[in-house]
């Protein structure tokens, strides 16, 4: 048996038996762990508040043959505001479901945990609108997970692209000039200049600044549509939590 001290973000919790809980957590290194928390629901338990959904905690774990159990945990942040806003909570649930899928490989993606923590911080404090946080999380997470879209040059003819004439195909994961896009067909959507600039920012900025951009109106709507389509296409999943989020936001 090995003892490990590590910071973890809880992305799923399942209560079972009388006092126990099972959690799924992302480590600070972006790896997914399933952790058994015995007695976590017992009255006065030291781990009760630190092994809850969306808590970022320092955990002492026992590892035995690839199975983890919680010995002790100290809460760093609970992102309490998340539970006070149903739209923010629903979005965080979708991020949790998406993160669980993207970390299925067992490999470490440190950017995943940092992106998620950044989103929780902003959502819980109402510091950025969910409609800005959602596409930024999706697109950067996909890029960090090996699905980096190419926004220049034209993937078909190689021409440099003017911001007013950039067309993007989710299926191809690449951009094309208007001439090539029209020849290739319906997969290509023309990007508004604001949408293109936001995508470039999301993909190239320091992780700390991924959510630091302003966008509204049709440009933001298009960004939301493209980033979600991109995520669904490459994960090939239907996310129940995403459907719930849309039922709240009304589109
Ligand atoms: Zn072209």
Image (cartoon, rainbow, N blue to C red):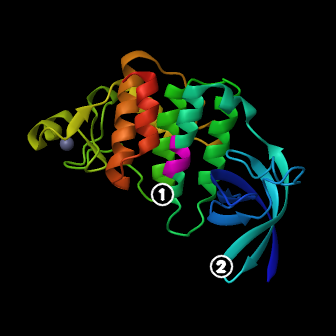
Give coordinates of residue 189: x percent, y percent: 24, 33
Q: Looking at the image, is mark 1 or mark 2 earlier in the sequence? A: 2
Residue tagged 1: 101
Residue at screen point 48% across, 57% down: 101
Place residue 209 in its image quadrant: top right
Confirm whether the magenta stretch covers residue 95. Answer: yes
Q: As rendered, which of 239 and 49 lies closer to the eye?
A: 49
Q: As rendered, which of 37 and 166 lies closer to the eye?
A: 37
Query: Compared to 189, does 66 lie above or below?
Result: below
The stretch of residues the image draws in magenta is 94-98
Residue at the far left: name it: 183
Locate the N terminus by quadrant: bottom right
Q: Is residue 153 left or right of residue 75?
A: left
| Mark 1 and mark 2: Cα distance apart in space | 19 Å
Locate the C terminus by quadrant: top left
Residue at screen point 53% across, 44% down: 95
At mark 2, the secondary structure is loop
Q: Is residue 54 left or right of residue 100?
A: right
């Amino acid at each position: 048996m090995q003892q490990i001290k590590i910071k973890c973000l809880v992305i799923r919790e399942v209560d079972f038996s009388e006092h126990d809980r099972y959690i799924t957590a992302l480590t600070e290194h972006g790896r997914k762990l399933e952790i058994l928390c015995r007695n976590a629901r017992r009255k006065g338990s030291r781990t009760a508040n630190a092994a809850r959904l969306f808590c970022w905690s320092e955990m002492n774990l026992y590892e035995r043959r690839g199975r983890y159990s919680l010995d002790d945990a100290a809460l760093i942040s609970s992102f309490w505001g998340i539970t006070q806003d149903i739209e923010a909570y629903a979005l965080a649930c979708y991020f949790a479901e998406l993160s669980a899928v993207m970390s299925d490989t067992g490999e470490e993606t440190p950017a995943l945990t940092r992106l998620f923590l950044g989103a929780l911080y902003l959502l819980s404090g109402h510091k950025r609108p969910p409609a800005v946080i959602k596409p930024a999380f999706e697109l950067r997470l996909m890029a960090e997970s090996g699905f980096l879209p190419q926004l220049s040059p034209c993937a078909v003819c190689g021409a440099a692209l003017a911001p007013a004439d950039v067309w993007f195909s989710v299926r191809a994961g690449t951009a094309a000039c208007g001439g090539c896009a029209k020849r290739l067909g319906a997969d290509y959507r023309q990007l508004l200049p604001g949408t293109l600039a936001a995508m470039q920012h999301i993909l190239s900025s320091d992780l700390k600044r991924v959510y630091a951009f302003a966008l509204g109106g049709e440009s933001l709507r298009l960004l939301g549509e493209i980033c979600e389509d991109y995520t669904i296409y490459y994960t090939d999943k239907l996310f129940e939590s995403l459907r719930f989020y849309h039922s709240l936001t009304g589109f």
